[in-house]
């Protein structure tokens, strides 16, 4: 089975993770712009970060057999630094039209402040202007109110639910998100957001329609194999294979494919891996490691990507 991890912060992960994800069946992933763990001090650091996720990270993933896409946005935490936020809003449009950008995100609320609300609305307008889907971050605290408010604001701005993925759902929010016609994403993030056993129970109750399973893996305690592990657990516990395929692959493609930037042919007919390739003079190789070089048209099987 092929998987798409629709929320993975790979800038925080190692090449070992890319190899393991490819071996587990992950063919594509989406890297949302997010908070890096400490406050950015100026717009220049945001500029370099966005340049990285539309550039080198896309190249790095490809060198390990995974197609990389990203979303562009001002994170809700940093919306509370008004000077920084104003600067970031000025540079977002130039990044949002880059190749491989599949949505504006992840945006929304953290503490649900007035500044978060202002920049959330401004970014919804940017998404409308560019015809891009939206990825919404729902708050860790007061999640139910923040989720409802996020959807209300989308409707108020005329963004159709079919163009909005509401992420970090749980048992408390899923029903309203689905009932209102939005995509409902779940981050399998151990011990905090959602476990895979809980996710299986949600699939049992709601089926696979408009549900997206992702890992949200980042610099925290998280698992880049969470999508594959959840799919396996779901199948073991009797969830129909079609429901698993929808939640772990097809729905992410349908939602973010609306950008026109993400197509199945990208990974069904991928370019051959050649780790001698350079990106702005740099390769993914370190310490004299022998490069992986595929022949054009070579079939990429699971064994090929197993770590030796």
Image (spheres, rainbow, N blue to C red):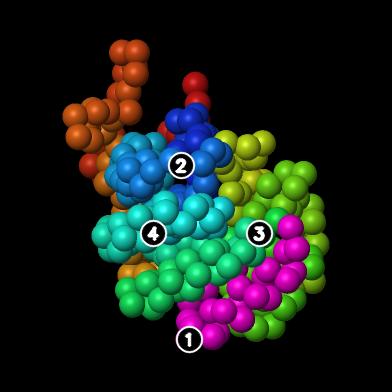
Which of pointers 2 and 1 lies earlier in the amino acid sequence? Answer: 2
Q: Looking at the image, which residue is at 47% across and 61% down?
A: 105
Estimate the spatial distance between the alpha carbons at disc 3 and disc 4, rounded to whole Å. 19 Å
Residue 138 locus on image (x, y percent):
64, 62
Q: Looking at the image, which residue is at 69% across and 63% down?
A: 169
Question: Does the magenta-highlighted stretch encompass residue 162?
Answer: yes
Which of pointers 1 and 4 lies earlier in the amino acid sequence? Answer: 4
Residue 130 sits above or below residue 214 on the image: below
Residue 196 locus on image (x, y percent):
74, 51
Secondary structure of residue under mark 1: loop
Residue 86, numbered circle: 4
Residue 158, numbered circle: 1
* Mark 2 burial class by Cα count in 10 Å: few <14, some 14-19, many 20+: some
The magenta span reads 141-167
Badge 2 is on which residue? Answer: 40
Residue 241 locus on image (x, y percent):
65, 63
Badge 3 is on which residue? Answer: 111
**Comparing labels 2 and 1, the label whose residue is closer to the camera:** 2
């Amino acid at each position: 089975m092929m998987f798409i991890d629709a929320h993975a912060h790979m800038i925080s992960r190692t090449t070992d993770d890319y190899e393991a994800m490819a071996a587990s069946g992950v063919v594509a992933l989406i890297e949302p712009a997010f908070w890096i763990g400490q406050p950015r001090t100026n717009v220049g650091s945001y500029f370099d970060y966005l340049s990285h996720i539309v550039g080198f990270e896309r190249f790095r993933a490809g060198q390990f057999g995974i197609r990389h896409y990203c979303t562009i946005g001002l994170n809700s935490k940093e919306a509370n630094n008004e000077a920084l936020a104003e600067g970031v809003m000025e540079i977002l449009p130039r990044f949002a039209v880059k190749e491989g950008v599949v949505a504006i995100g992840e945006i929304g609320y953290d503490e649900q402040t007035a500044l978060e609300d202002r920049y959330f609305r401004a970014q919804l307008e940017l998404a409308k202007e560019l015809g891009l889907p939206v990825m919404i971050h729902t708050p860790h605290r007061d999640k139910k109110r923040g989720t409802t408010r996020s959807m209300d604001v989308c409707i108020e701005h005329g963004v159709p639910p079919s163009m909005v993925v509401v992420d970090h759902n749980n048992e408390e929010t899923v029903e309203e998100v689905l009932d209102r016609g939005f995509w409902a994403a779940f981050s399998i993030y151990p011990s905090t957001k959602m476990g895979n056993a809980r996710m299986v129970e949600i699939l049992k109750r709601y089926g696979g329609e408009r549900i997206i399973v992702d890992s949200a893996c980042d610099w925290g305690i998280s698992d880049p194999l969470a999508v594959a592990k959840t799919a396996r657990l779901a199948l073991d516990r009797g969830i129909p294979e079609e429901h698993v395929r929808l939640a772990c692959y097809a729905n992410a493609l349908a939602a973010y494919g609306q950008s026109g930037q993400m197509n199945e042919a990208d990974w069904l007919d991928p370019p051959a891996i050649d780790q001698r390739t350079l990106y702005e003079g740099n390769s993914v190789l370190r310490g004299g490691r022998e490069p992986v070089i595929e022949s054009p048209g070579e079939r990429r099987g699971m064994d090929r990507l197993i770590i030796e």
